[in-house]
Each structure stands twice: as structure tokens, then as C-alpha cells.
Image (cartoon, rainbow, N blue to C red):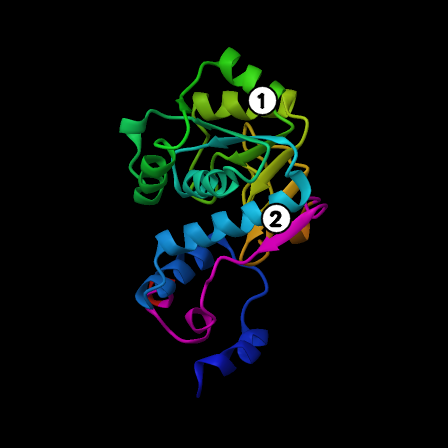
Amino acid sequence: MRMQSLKEFSIYTKKTLSVRDTYALRANAEALGVTKMLLTENAGANIANELLHKHKNDTILVVSGCGNKGAIGLSVARHLLERAKSVEVVLLCKPEEITDKELKANYDILSKLIHIESRPDSNALARKVRGADVVIDAIVGIGLHGRPDSCLSAAIGIINKYSKHTVSIDIPSGINPDTGLPNVASIKAQRLYVLYKSKPFLITREYAQNVEIIDMGFPYIGELLTGPGDVML
């Protein structure tokens, strides 16, 4: 069977991806050579292109957490540079605290191109949010366990209070992707760029307004054939 013909079998794959499904699919993709770094880059480039259609003449602030969602946010920012009117980036941790290798790689590149303010105080973050036309929520995604720490909770509260227009990547930070239930702090987004496939919370909750699915290069074969991710499940 030719690889090109596999797409027609996508009708047999899941329509939504739970947290467990997403981690399994990532493992299958990695085994096929489609690395997490490549997926991060694809997502960042495609989200940036969508943003340019709507917000090319706006000032854009990317608020990045310290995991893979933050890595995508920094990739978005890099692809927007010199194409959007203005791009600023805030990182909600110190550079030396970064452990996610995709975030580290993107930080190392982007910090050579623009100033990235790390772990700003509440007043500094509020000024930046108030001054932006669009705020990109790249704070925390499916990797959130328990409550967000005080820094993340404060940032979420500031964005909800002062942002003119908030765009979230994959899920609004603080929302459980499987149930749609909010955490003690959760983003209220006007637009949502969901990665690869819809998430279960979009079926049961009212987050479906202004939702767009963003391709990030997951291979169909990773869903159709058994791989290490299926062993994980």
C-alpha cells in the first residue's frame, strides 16, 4: 500500500484526541521520525500564518509558560517577527529553569533576535497586556497536573482582566482538555487554535466559538498502525 493512499483511511481514526491519546500519538510519531521538535515548529509556523491573516497590523504579545505549549508560543513569535506590526514575548520562568528541550531550543534562537522578559512582576505584565492588541496564551496545555502555581495563576488573571483579544493555543490554559472543567485559574479566550484534532472538551462545553484546527504534521500512519504509543495505552 502506498503511503499516499493512507489518508483515505483517516475516517477510521478518532475524531477527538484525549490527553492519553495525544501522548500516544506523539510516541508513535517519534518512532516514525516525526520528532516533537518538528511538530512544535510546524504548529508554530501554521499558527503564525493564521494570525497574520487577521492580526498583521496589530501589536502581539506572546505569554509563554515553561513547557511544550510555551515552545510553540515562542515558535509562533519567531515566525511573526518582521511580518507582524509588533511582537513581544514574556516568559513566565527564568531561562535557567527551562527543562523542556523544545522550549530551550526556541528560547536560544529567539533571545538572539528580540528581548524576552523573563518572569516579570504583576505590574510589568499588566502593562504589556494592556498595551497589546492581541495576547497569545501559550502558558500551559495538557501537561498541567493539579493547580497552576502562583505565577501562572497571576498571569492568567492579568490576561483575563486586561487583554483586548486573547488567542489560546490548543486549549485555554487552565481548562481540562478532557472534561472542559476550569482549574482555579483559567484563560477566557476569544479564539482557539486547536492542534491537529478536536479535543473532548469542545463537544461538551461552550468553547467552540472561533475555533480553528491547526495542522502540525502528525502522520496518519501513526494513528492507523500500532506503535509504541499504543503499548503505552
Mark closer to the observer (1, 2): 2
- Please identify the quarter of the rendering in which residue 115 is found: top left
- Residue 178 visible somewhere in the drawing: no
**Which residue is label 1 attached to?**
129
- Whether 228 is among the magenta residues is yes
Instruction: Between residue 107 and residue 19, name the one nearer to us.
Output: 107
Mark 2 burial class by Cα count in 10 Å: few <14, some 14-19, many 20+: some
- Give the secondary structure at mark 2: helix
Q: Is residue 225 above or below residue 42?
A: below
Q: CA distance from mark 1 to mark 2?
A: 21 Å
Query: Within the image, what quadrant is residue 181 found in?
Result: top right
Callout 1 environment at 10 Å: few (<14), some (14 to 19), or many (20+)? many
Relative height, residue 43 to residue 99 (above, below): below
Residue extending furthest toward the top? 123
Outermost residue toward the front?
A: 82
Residue type (three-letter) at the residue carrying disc 1: Val
Query: Residue 96's spot in the image, x, y percent?
Result: 27, 27
Coordinates of residue 83 in the picture (x, y in percent)? 55, 40
Q: Amino acid at mark 2?
A: Glu
Q: Earlier in the sequence, mark 1 or mark 2?
A: 2
Q: Who's the residue at 68% across and 26% down the image?
A: 164
Image x and y of residue 45, in percent: 50, 50
- Magenta extent: 206-230
For residue 50, which numbered disc appears in the image?
Answer: 2
| Quadrant of the drawing holding the N terminus | bottom left
